[in-house]
Image (spheres, helix red, strand yellow):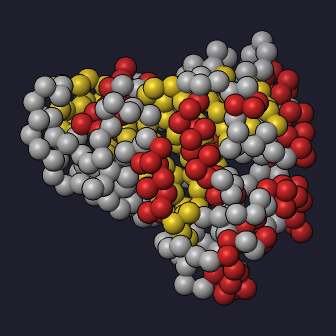
C-alpha cells in the first residue's frame, strides 16, 4: 500500500475544531462527549489552544490510572495526554507520540504550565516525534508501558499490523490497549481507502471489524472487549455518496495482554468476582466492558477471561475473586459476539463482550 502518512500529516496540520478549519465530517468531533465528571474536571484545566486543534472519535481514558505509565499513540496537541497526566498523579508518567511537528509544538508549549496547574514539581509528560508503527526507534522499550491509548489515529496508519505488534511489544504483561477508532462493516476498495479526504476524515483507513479481530488474534490477543459503540455520523451528503453502502462505527475497545491466560472463547471455571469499590467515578458500580457491570459488593459469576482481566491487572486490588482454574465446567454460557450500540452502560451481565467469540 502507498504510504500516505505525509499527506495525512499535512491534512492534520490545517484542521481545527472551529470556523474554516473544521473537518468535512463529524466523525472525529466527539472527543469530549460523554466523559465522567472526574475526567471533565481534568479537561477543564487544559488550555483552549490544545482543545481547538484536537480531534478524536471517543474518550479512550480507562479508569484506575494512579501511578501508571501511559502511552498515547497519535497524541496530537495533547488533550488526552494532559488529561491523563492529572489522573496518573505526580508519580505516574504519560508519553505522547505523534508524527506532526505543528501539533507537537502546541502540546510541548504547555508542559510547564500544566505541571504547575496540577501541583507537580515537574512535568510527568513527554512528547516524542515518531511513527506509531516504529516505537522502538524513539526509545520505547519492551514491556515498559502499563496502558496504551489512542484516539481515532490507528485507522490513519497504512501499516496497522506493525502498529499492533508494537503495542504488544511495549505493554507489560497484564497491560492494556484501550483505544477509540472508526471501523467499517465490510471491506472496501481503493476508491475509498486511497482517497485523501476520506483518509483524513478517518473513513478511508477504517478496518473491517472482523479483519481487526483476526489481526489481534494473530498477534496474541485472543479476546478483546467493547467499551462503547456508536454508529459514526458522517453528516456530509457528498462524502456519504462517496462511501456508498459502507457503514462506519466508532468503537472504544480494550484488549489485555495476558498470553498465558486469555483463551479464544469464554470458559467456565466456576469463578466469581465481587467489586469492593474504590475506583474514582465508579463509586457504586464498575463496568469492565459493555456487557459486564459489577455492582458494589454484589458477587457476579464470570468466565476465565473476565476473571483474568481483573485478577491479573491493576484492577485486582479493587476486587475479591473466589475460585481458580483447578476445575473446568465447559464453555461459559451466554457469550455475546456483538457490541451494545448506543447504550450508556452494559446491555446485560452475560459473558462476554464483543471480542470473545468462537
The answer to which of 44 and 313 lies nearer the viewer is: 313
Which quadrant would residue 268 be assigned to in this image? top left
- Residue 58 point in image, percent of width and height: 60, 53
Q: Which residue: 17% across, 28% down?
A: 325
Which quadrant would residue 45 be assigned to in this image? top right
Q: Is residue 294 left or right of residue 152?
A: left
Single out the residue that lies furthest toward the front.
1
Residue 269 visible to an observer of this rendering = yes
Single out the residue that lies furthest toward the top.
121
The answer to which of 314 and 355 lies nearer the viewer is: 355
Label tally: 0
The answer to which of 173 and 294 lies nearer the viewer is: 173
Which image quarter holds the N terminus? bottom right
Which quadrant would residue 24 be assigned to in this image? bottom right
Q: Which residue: 51% across, 25% down?
A: 172
- Residue 349 point in image, percent of width and height: 25, 49
Q: Which residue: 86% across, 33% down?
A: 108
Q: Is residue 73 above or below residue 350?
A: above
Q: Is residue 106 above or below residue 335?
A: above
Q: Which residue: 38% across, 33% down?
A: 259
Which image quarter holds the C terminus? bottom left
- Residue 44 point in image, percent of width and height: 72, 40
Residue 299 visible to an observer of this rendering = no
Q: Is residue 214 left or right of residue 77?
A: left
Q: Is residue 128 left or right of residue 180?
A: right
Q: Is residue 251 above or below residue 287?
A: below
Amino acid at each position: 500500500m502507498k504510504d500516505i502518512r505525509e499527506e495525512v500529516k499535512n491534512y492534520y496540520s490545517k484542521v481545527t475544531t472551529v470556523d474554516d478549519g473544521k473537518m468535512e465530517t463529524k466523525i472525529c468531533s466527539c472527543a469530549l462527549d460523554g466523559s465522567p465528571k472526574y475526567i471533565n474536571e481534568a479537561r477543564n484545566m487544559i488550555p483552549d489552544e490544545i482543545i481547538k486543534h484536537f480531534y478524536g472519535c471517543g474518550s479512550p481514558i480507562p479508569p484506575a490510572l494512579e501511578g501508571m505509565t501511559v502511552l498515547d499513540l497519535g497524541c496530537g496537541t495533547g488533550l488526552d495526554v494532559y488529561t491523563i497526566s492529572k489522573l496518573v498523579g505526580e508519580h505516574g508518567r504519560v508519553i505522547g507520540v505523534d508524527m506532526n511537528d505543528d501539533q507537537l509544538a502546541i502540546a510541548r508549549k504547555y508542559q510547564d504550565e500544566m505541571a504547575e496547574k496540577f501541583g507537580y514539581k515537574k512535568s510527568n509528560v513527554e512528547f516524542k516525534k515518531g511513527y506509531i508503527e516504529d516505537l522502538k526507534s524513539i526509545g520505547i522499550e519492551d514491556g515498559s508501558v502499563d496502558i496504551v491509548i489512542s484516539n481515532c489515529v490507528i485507522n490513519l496508519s497504512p501499516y496497522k499490523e506493525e502498529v499492533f505488534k508494537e503495542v504488544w511489544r511495549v505493554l507489560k504483561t497484564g497491560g492494556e490497549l484501550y483505544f477509540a477508532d472508526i471501523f467499517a462493516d465490510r471491506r472496501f476498495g481503493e476508491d475509498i481507502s486511497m482517497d485523501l479526504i476520506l483518509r483524513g476524515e478517518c473513513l478511508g483507513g477504517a478496518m473491517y471489524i472482523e479483519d481487526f479481530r483476526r489481526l489481534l488474534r494473530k498477534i496474541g490477543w485472543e479476546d478483546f472487549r467493547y467499551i462503547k459503540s456508536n454508529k459514526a455520523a458522517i453528516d456530509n451528503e457528498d462524502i456519504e455518496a462517496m462511501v456508498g453502502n459502507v457503514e462506519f462505527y466508532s468503537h472504544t475497545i480494550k484488549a489485555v495482554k495476558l498470553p498465558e491466560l486469555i483463551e479464544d472463547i469464554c470458559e467456565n471455571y466456576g469463578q466469581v468476582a465481587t467489586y469492593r469499590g474504590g475506583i474514582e467515578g465508579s463509586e457504586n458500580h464498575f463496568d469492565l466492558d459493555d456487557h459486564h457491570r459489577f455492582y458494589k459488593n454484589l458477587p457476579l459469576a464470570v468466565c476465565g477471561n473476565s476473571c483474568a482481566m481483573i485478577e491479573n491487572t491493576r484492577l485486582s486490588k479493587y476486587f475479591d475473586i473466589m475460585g481458580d482454574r483447578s476445575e473446568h465446567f465447559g464453555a461459559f454460557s451466554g457469550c455475546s459476539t456483538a457490541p451494545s450500540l448506543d447504550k450508556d452502560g452494559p446491555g446485560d451481565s452475560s459473558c462476554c463482550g464483543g471480542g470473545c467469540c468462537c
